[in-house]
Amino acid sequence: MEFLQEWGLTLAIFLPLVGVAVMMAFPKSDEATHKVIALATSLVVAAIGVLLLFDFDFDRADEMQWAVSHDWIDIIRTQYSIGIDGMSLPLLLLTMLITPLVIIYSWNHFPEPHNPKAFLMLILVLHAGMIGTFVARDLVLFFVFFEVVLLPMFFMIAVWGGEDRRYASLKFFLYTLFGSALMLVSFLALFFLAGGETFSITGLADAVVENGVSRNAQLWVFGGMLLGFGVKVPMFPFHTWLPDAHTQAPTQGSVILAAVLLKLGTYGFVRIAIPILPEAAVAWAPWIGLLAVIGIIYGALGCLAQTDMKRLIAFSSVAHMGYVMLGIATLTDWGINAAVFGMVAHGLITGMLFFVAGSVKERYHTLEIKRLGGLLVQAPRMGWILGFISMASLGLPGLAGFWGEFPAILAAYNPANGLPVGLFRVYMVIAALGTVLAAGYLLWLLQRTAMGEPSEEFANDPHITDTNREEWLAWSPLLVLILVFGLVPGLIFNVTDDAVDANLSDCLSAGDLDSSVKGSFDIGLCEREGIDEALAQLNVAIAGDEG
Amino acid sequence: MSAAVLAQVVPFERPPIDWHAVAPELILLGFGALLTLIDAVYLERGRKFTSALAGIGLLAALVPVVTLAIDGNDRYMFNDAYVVDNFALVMKAMFLLSGYVVVLLSTNYISEGDYWENEYYGMLISSVLGMIVMASARDLITIFVALELLSIPAYLMATWRKRDLKSNEAGLKYYLMGVFASAVMLYGMSLLYGVTGTTILADMGEVLNTGESTSVVSLAIVFVIAGFAFKVSAVPFHTWAPDTYEGAPTPVTAFLAVASKAAGFVALVQLVFVGFWGRGDVYEPLMWVLAAASMTVGNLVALRQTNMVRMMAYSGIASAGYIMAPLAVAGVSGDVADEALRAVVTYLVIYAAMNLGVFAVILGIARKTKSAEISSYAGLFQYAPGLTVVMTVFLMALAGIPPFGGWWAKFVVFRALVNADTTMGYSLAVIAAVNSVIALYYYLSVLRTMWADEAPDGDVTPIRIPASLVGALGLTALATMAFGVYPKLVDTVADVSLLVGAGG
């Protein structure tokens, strides 16, 4: 296992690129070979993920494991520094799961203009970028991988997208790039303010304290990161690229975008922005919370106004990521654990929703809600799947979606000290109202598309078949996980809890903070037992319900 | 009688020459002469080998550059008028390699167009010779001679498509503007000589740095810098560039856009860092204005272009602004100056790789479409995916998206500007940042056309790319990627300093 310790993560990042290089050697017409190579590559990467899972020391989930550090660009003291802890592990595994599933789904479903070679190559490049972002421990490395993800997605939308793809792809690219430019400026400012010694995330957190970076400067730097990560999440009001990108992207693009890319933003908050600049995080948190609840309500209302199924799902993403951001904004152990869970749950559920939307589109050649209907009659299994994930998405207890939303809402009841309690309780009420709206639009969607009789134009359409083999292969792991994580949320919470704790309380206690923030350790960040107990109680409660 | 007069004159004594140090120049000179001889002796039959011979000559000249670099000693000749130091060697290597890539780009273009091959490569080699002399020139007269040696063949090469009106226009415009710039510069140089009594830059620097500020000195510095601003096509001296670039044969355009521009910068940094360094009060504001104007005007006008070569001309003007930007803070302190110089060198090296790459792709596409209109690039992804992908690499590198080379070039410029910790530095960094986003838009629209649009007339027959062009594409793409993924490569070579006796 020593070889894996040293090389495992590096292999996971670069194997997809090796796959791309191998695919270059085969002509475009040799489609079967390309599919096999791409799938094999992604499966090998997934296998590394499985090994990782077995080798991961869960008792030390708060530490960086499989850590590797090598000099990269001496002159700016940036290192090729990678590693994973309990916070990145779930997201890394999610990425490693989603990509092979997307490739399996693609098998006979390549969108126009076809060209599997280029399409799969882009997916693999994307894969490398996503994995790299989740394992990077150095800001420059993080930034590079963060950007690597942009181009393949741009081309995926621009080439394989729908009618309006030119507009959507450019909007996607410019929005994200605008954000990441500001993010880069923040990183650089941070580097220089903190003495110009290191770009390592933990190193910077210490250096910020040692060099006594002024509060004002911290606030500005955090603001830059807020924009950079916030565009990616996306937070209201930077979300407008998302519905366009999702609607125009091919199914595979939408799935990856929803399941993984959006998480890069929220992950940035919990991995970079808050641990390095805790003081600024406390100052910004009420505003982040505000934007989060606006996002929840606005996203939900947006959903109710949509006529297109994919666009509706896109807006529901805005709402769901609002819960994640609300959890983060509370700056509590609870809230951030919920946020990481919410990221994984949203990845599974919304990824699934886009898969189903893609399959519906393929059969009906439209996603206009008013023309659809009777899916349960024409394709009963797919109809039931849609029902199942709608329930998961609206946060039904016992399915994964619940554990992202409910603890986040609860955490807002008692935010970290230094945050305005009253305000966050208002947020809590608003967010809770948002779940009602979520039930509303999802049930409405289900009712209009799955129930009733098929409309006349599709009633006797022989193309409308039930779930086929590739779809089952690609979907069943997601469906099973949605159920498993719903029933045993501890699978994720136990992994993330220590890491969240270490990442957030370490930096706060190391900081030279005013007493009000220090006080928060009593009820906020260091409350490990709290969450364990609460989880136990909730588990009992659910078991009771089910019993 | 004449014998008597001669006897009174001090007998000429050849100054000591370090043959190793001038070996690259001599080799190029030899190959240039050889090419001319082959033309004279074999006439048309010589055409078969000229391009190969030119390529070999350029690579052969690289050998002594490498041995000199391994040797590592700075060599001074002719009373310090000719210096071979790290800076000179890095730039020489860059000129020779760029020249080699230009030969690769030219091979098919020139022979298929039935242009005068032997003369063409002779011109190319003498122009490169001028450039590598420029890299060592630390004396006003040597600089001027090098400048003319590199410019005059370039004027001719711009008109190489003799029967094409646009090519004639290109050459004539370039020539008139170039001569005008030379005149302005010469006037400035004569003033400098008058004030300081020397043409050696290092000596001149000492006089200027300690002497009091007079309007004559300021005027002279402004004139000299303005002259080179023409050469590097900085706003407001840029007007020749788009027409010349569009009209000249495309390989020549690549040569002008990369090597000739870099030569202008080499002269400029030598003047600034060795000669004028202490007079930051004069050149810093000037550089600030030139850099800010070049970036902004270049990028904004590039947005409106429909022709790829013209777009690249404006993008080149904007790049000149980026390269010039660190010079606007060079006078702050010795450390900042060193960092500014490194930023300039880094940018020049990376820029050479990515920009030559773009022109290689333009040439490749033009083999089929016979056009450089951006609209003719539509649907390229369907029939030339390889070219599309490398073009993506080059354009994204120019836009500064990691992990392609350009991001590091932009990064060092930003770092130099921010590190200076002056208002001028910060304000220029902000202008450069805004411009990076503007630039992204037009690069991205080209890519979008190539990837997403339908091919005009549905013509999707593949493009046949000759071997030499493949070589050029491979070299430039490899370099662009390598610089981006592992910037240490370019960092090692860019570790240079020019501050002799200026208190660096």
Image (tube, helix red, strand yellow):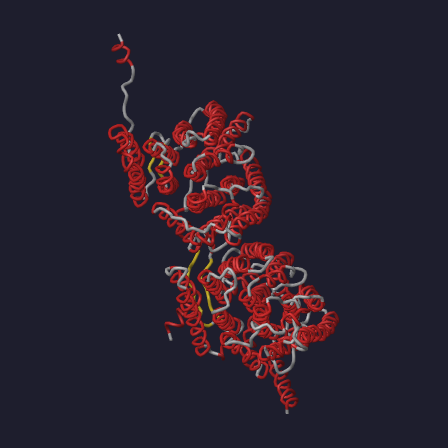
Q: Residue furthest bottom?
A: A547
Q: Classify B325 as above or below B180.
A: below
- Residue at x-position 47% and y-position 51%: B380
**Rendered location of residue A131, percent (x, y):** 48, 66
Q: Which quadrant holds the N terminus of chain A?
A: bottom left
Question: As drawn, which residue projects farthest toward the front?
Answer: A460
State the residue at coordinates (51%, 64%): A133
Counting from the top left corner in percent of width and height, residue B249 is at 43, 36
Q: Is residue B414 left or right of residue B385?
A: right
**Quadrant of the rendered structure where residue B99 is?**
top left
Using the image as rendered, state which of residue A338 and residue A527 is in the foreground.
A338
In this view, the residue in front, A343 or A411, is A343
Q: Is residue A157 left or right of residue A453?
A: left
- Residue A320: percent from left, percent from top: 64, 70
- Report the residue at 60% width, 69% height from top: A364
Give residue B378's position: percent from left, percent from top: 51, 49
Position of residue B334 in the picture relative to residue B105 (left or right) = right
- Say above or below: A313 vs A399: above
Location of residue B75 with respect to A438 vertically, above or below: above
Is residue B378 visible in this depiction of the protein? Answer: yes
* Nearer to me, A249 or B79: A249
Q: Is residue B331 visible?
A: no
- Give B488 or A439, whichever is nearer the viewer: A439
Quadrant of the frame with the C terminus of chain A: bottom right
Q: Is residue B90 left or right of residue A116?
A: left
